[in-house]
Amino acid sequence: MTADGYCLHYDCSSPVATRRLARLLGRLARPGLVIALTGALGSGKTAFVQGLAQGLAVPPDCYVTSPSFTLINVYPGRIPLCHADLYRLGEGADLEAIGLLEHLEQEEVVAVEWAAHAAADLPLDHLTVHLEISGDRQRRITLTAGGRETENLLKDVAAAWRQDPFSG
Ligand SMILES: Nc1ncnc2c1ncn2[C@@H]1O[C@H](COP(=O)(O)OP(=O)(O)OP(=O)(O)O)[C@@H](O)[C@H]1O
Ligand SMILES: [Mg+2]
């Protein structure tokens, strides 16, 4: 399920709004969730993961930064958060060599920036988060389900966002 996967679109008009959406996703996430983050340089992938960390109750003193050089950072939380960045690896990234395959098999939430570099190695039922720069501080964020589990998660996200007084 790719082209016609269940998807949601959100227009986030500030980094705070992007983090709020991601935080909501983090609150609803279950162990084993894999999130593929795509979008141009500076589109807000790391900002999204910062919100995700808040939703997973990662302690505030664990500041989430881009793992561009370390490739993988793991943070403690309600569910451990594994944050990877494949930018430097380019196409056909070897996920085994960098230790990411191991994390994909654990009871963690795994968020991967530049995930298109390794799309074939991600489980089919992953969530794709695409960020498009639609203005100076505006980002159009599309969440696409890869299968049944992530589709159910997105339905919960849509319902929770509708109830969020700040969602408008
Ligand atoms: N609505 C928005 N959502 C997210 N970030 C925004 C938004 N508006 C402006 N920004 C700014 O865009 C930048 C996003 O940077 P961030 O490091 O999150 O991007 P990235 O996609 O991870 O980049 P890279 O590909 O280099 O890893 C930040 O400086 C942030 O303040
Ligand atoms: Mg980044």
Image: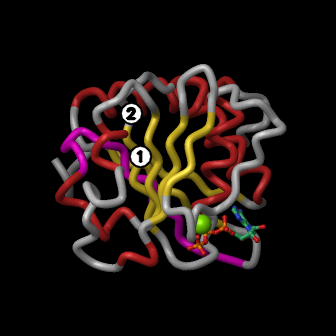
Please name the residue shown 63% across and 75% down the image: 42
Q: How many numbered markers are drawn?
A: 2
Residue 53 image point, x, y percent: 65, 38
Magenta segment range? 122-135
Please name the residue shown 37% across and 76% down the image: 89
Question: Where is mark 2, residue-wise?
Answer: 33
Please name the residue shown 43% across and 49% down the image: 143
> Residue reaching furthest right?
61
Please name the residue shown 22% across and 73% down the image: 92
Q: Secondary structure at mark 2?
A: loop
Mark 1 C-beta closer than 8 Å to ligand 1: no
Marks 1 and 2 sit apart, C-alpha to C-alpha, by 7 Å
Quadrant in the picture for residue 65: bottom right
Neighbor class of circle 2 (other Cα within 10 Å; few <14, some 14-19, many 20+) is many
Say which mark, if any, is on residue 35: 1
Quadrant in the picture for residue 104: top left
Marks 1 and 2 close (CB-CB < 8 Å): yes
Q: As shown in the figure, which amino acid type bears the numbered disc 2?
A: Leu
Q: Nearer the viewer, residue 26 or 117?
A: 117
Residue 101 image point, x, y percent: 28, 46
